[in-house]
Image (cartoon, helix red, strand yellow):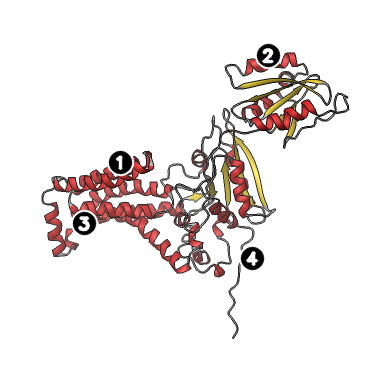
Amino acid sequence: MNGKSEDMLHDHTDRISSDLNEIIPLIKNKFSDTPDLVFRKLTIKQTNEQALIIYLESMTERTAINHDVLRPLQQESGSGLPGDELIMNVGQMMSETSFSRMESSVLKGSSVLFVNGREEAYILDTRGWPQRAIQDSQLESSLKGAHQGFVETGDQNIAMIRRYITDRELKMKRLTVGRRGQTTVTILFLADVANPKLIDALEQRIQKVDVDVILNAGELSELIEDDPFSLFPQFVSTERPDTAASQLMQGRCVIVVDRSPNVIIAPVTFLTFFQNIDDYSIRWPIATFLRLLRLFAFFTAAFLPAFYIAVVTFHFEIIPMKLLMTLGESRGQVPFPPFVEAILMEITLEMLREAGVRLPAPIGQTVGIVGGIVIGQAVVQAGLISNIMVIVVAFTAISSFILPNYDMVAAVRLIRFILMGLATAFGFVGLVVGLMIMIAHLLTLKSLGMPYGSPIAPMRLVDWKDAIIRVPIWLIRDRPTNSAPLQQKRRGIAVRKEKKE
């Protein structure tokens, strides 16, 4: 009984008062030290009622308030009877009786209209916070695809995806995450293609997130991933709407996080990180070659420094004699063992990489080029690093730049140091053990409960058409099985027809 009494008391105190003289001091007390909160009293000409409109000046569009709300209320006449429906030109208007929900609406940019004598408030959609224009993606440059990137407004990002998929089966589920800063998280999926079990699992994971605020999509992906201790990313993050639309057509889900210029794609596989939307805009033999090149670059970026250390430290007998003499001459003046030599160069490379990212673009490019040339030449002349090590590190850096996904590049950067340590301690045996551990980890890893190693493990040859290789588009008639789609066959895939003589 006490619990029910407390709930009734809370409901009573949370209700909006019908007296404006009570509402104004209550709002001022709740929103203390908020100088951008505007109070505007007016008389509604339609009903001859006294009213009050409040809004945050920095979060609303003034033109919408003046032209779509204030002007109709103060200039357009009604029947004069209290209770008449208010005439406004605003796009969306909802009535609200809860003071706490009204408060949340104000903080999100809506304006609120109180009418004296009515125990409800009207939430008006007049949101207009500062936002940037749609631009090309900075991390995912497009060669032959669309030059549009997501922005920090969730509704605009959804609109960009809808431009690619104009189908009523494109459904959405909206959730709110965060206690202090409530963030709108939207799950997009094709209802007749995506597996309902995956959607329910994703929705449950997001609902369990209990934090103060979600600032970007990266935070959310870390909170809902299967293995938080893995170095490998388990969700794809993209800034391009065409990539998101392509993944939706394959039966996957897209998570749009408001205030973030990235969306999350789930579930994914290891090979998804080596694919690019531009692969479908070029000839299929070239796209296949590029995918194989990216896989080769991944293993090169991860294993090349460790392979060099293992060869120089333990297995120099496999080096041809002429190359061994050149290598010995290059390392003759170097006072450090190969591991220390490699660590110094790799850390220097990482510092140059971070400096180039954090500085403005023109300065960053200059720092990267000048720093790489000057430092590389200086350390070789000083006898601190051998010429071969500079070549190995440069080739490693170029290989990592080939990978199209930044999250996978970051994983490779850390794996490289682990493999270097194993190679220093055990030589080729350490490299083989490191490779086996990495493969075993990839095969046991899950993405939203689905196998991360598909279509290699479990082996699904039908998915190889658009995984490691890329066959002609007219032969890709099935959706990837790793997302367990309801419709395995694609609709509308063009079938190649031979010309009749």
**What's the CA distance linking mark 2 and mark 4?**
62 Å
Name the residue located 76 percent from the left edge and 32 percent from the top edge: 88
The vertical placement of 43 against 433, above or below, is above
How many numbered marks does the figure carry? 4
Q: Which residue is mark 2?
A: 25
Residue 354 is left or right of residue 251, and the answer is: left
Residue at disc 4, secondary structure: loop
Mark toward the viewer: 2 or 4:
2
Q: Residues within 10 Å of mark 3 (few under 14, many from 20)?
A: some
Q: Which residue is mark 3?
A: 311
Residue 56, image x, y percentages: 62, 25
- In the picture as drawn, the residue positioned furthest to the bottom comes out as 501
N-term-proximal mark, 2 vs 3: 2
Instruction: Check residue 492 in the rendering and tell me which mark sits there, or answer none.
Output: 4
Q: Nearer the viewer, residue 375 or 317?
A: 375
Q: Which residue is mark 1?
A: 351
Tell me the quarter of the image containing the N terminus: top right
Instruction: Check residue 14 in the rendering and tell me which mark sits there, or answer none.
Output: none
